[in-house]
Image (tube, rainbow, N blue to C red):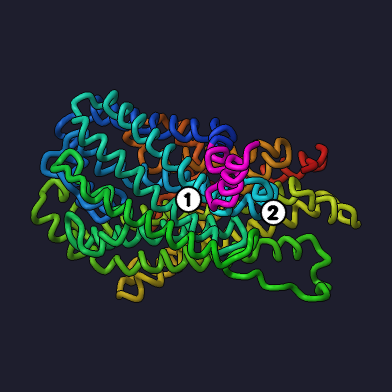
Amino acid sequence: MSTTSTAAARTLSGSPLAGLGELCRHIVRRDRIRLTVWTLSIAAFTLYFAFALTTIFDEAALRARAAVMETPSGIVMGGPGYGLDDYTPAVAMANEGITWIVLALAIMSILHVVRHTRLEEETGRSELVLASAVGRRAPGVAAMLTLGAHLLVTAAVATGAMLLGAPDAPLADTAAMMLGCALSAFVFGAVALVTSQITSHARTAIGLALAVFGLAFVVRAAGDLQERGGSALSWLSPIAWAQQLRAFVDVRWWPLLLSLAAVVALLVVAALLSGRRDIGAGLVATRPGRRDARTTLRSPMALAWLQQRGALLWSTLGLGLLWFASGTMMSTLDDMVSDLVETNPIIGQLFGTDPSEFTTSFLGVMMLYISLCAAAYAIVAGQRPKGEETAGRLELPLAAPVSRARWLGGQLTVAGLGTLVLLAASVYGLWAGAALVGVDDPGLGDYTAVFVSYTPAVLVFLGLTAALYGWAPRATGLAWLLLAFVFIAGMFGALFELPEWVLGISPFHWVPESFGDGVDGAGLAGLTAVAAALFLVGIVGFRRRDALSG
């Protein structure tokens, strides 16, 4: 090798972005199936949603849906309400679909970035990578570049899918809508890059990024409730930037610049934070443990509590505050409903003129969100035993006089109690927020009945995760498919015209209507039996199979 080429190689290896191309190719190759599934899932949802709006709903039905989108529940689920006076299938897609497309893409973005940055450092693999000719900033930049490319591909495929389902939709507006969703999700991917610098644990980084998304959702909903078309508060949320493109009404492109500016700002912040920490460590240092372990740590349940308490604390605090803030929005419902009934007679025909009916509808939507969050936590906590096993730490407690059933039982007990604590903090946080602004109907007893009703349904998700772990630990991710189905059935079951037996797959289908008929004893007992059976199946399977080794 010549002197010139040797100097060039040394310069490249010393660059903060050295090895960037190789890392990008590695990420794409490693995640090619995962990324393809995400893209096809978003495209399939978009295609079916657009096709259903075009073929199933006539003009009168679309006007009725437009009236729903003017209600508080519709605003929270949808957005600012552009184009409600001429509610075409394309306008309906923008009003009712953007929030959920951004949600799906944001979750994918957060998981992708944390997976290829913080998780790599936590497992120690990044040290091996950085020991070669790879720059310090290359992993983070590679994660963002591959994420951006994937979001653009997904936006293009989803654009084609929507045009296939709704051929009359303008191409430019459709592309704007999907590109806006992709860029809004890209913002949350950049948020995840920042949280990956702050904490030393991947789960915490994911939780913090998701908490930012939850805050953005509440800010957007609160701003849109204040004023049709969105208020100044709405513009503080990246979710609103996709909606404010006003696709299929009067499209404007400049809100895309807000997403790009936010991404650039967050990347700068992530770079500054990265330079202030060591590889493998977070900006917030992990607190050193005690010199000698407490005697209470001799039990598997105590060990599980020590492992899970941090995630439970931050999840409970974040979601509790989120739903408390949501409860404070209920003081505006009565005035909003009165104005809507006066200006839109269809609303009165569909829902009546009693504001309490709108309050119940609004709370029902909030309870669906709350239960989905609790179910997601149950799945994450239920996968903790798999993480212990694949990391090789399972052999240590089992080397002591601890049975497999006792170890897994301790893990699942702590996960189950944590799930119930999270659910209770969310439900009663919503009640406390409403009570703070003077909304005392429904009362505390009604919220307690809702909490009791949803308890076994949420635990079914933990039981399913446990059963999958016990018999097929590599398939525990399939529990997320049930959560996705429950979300689609709960939000779009009527639109998709799903048969009763299909809706019955959802545990929430057997929960009585929130703040309606109280507690259904039969449904409560049935769901409890299902959850208990799944836990038992998981423990039996775990006792019968071999343990994974790394």
Residue at screen point 36% across, 52% down: 365
**Secondary structure beneath disc 1?**
helix
Residue at screen point 54% across, 31% down: 32
Spot occupied by residue 234 in the image (x, y as percentages of width and height): 26, 60
In magenta segment, residue 3: yes
Can you see residue 9?
A: yes
* Label 1: how many Cα within 10 Å (few below 14, some 14–19, many 20+): some
Spot occupied by residue 414 in the image (x, y as percentages of width and height): 68, 60
In magenta segment, residue 408: no
In this picture, which residue range is highlighted in magenta?
A: 1-24
Residue at numbered disc 1 = 372
Asked whether 32 or 472 is in front, the reply is 32
Residue at screen point 28% across, 48% down: 242
Residue at numbered disc 2 = 412
Characterize the magenta stretch by its predominant secondary structure. helix
Quadrant where the N terminus lies? top right
Spot occupied by residue 528 in the image (x, y as percentages of width and height): 61, 49
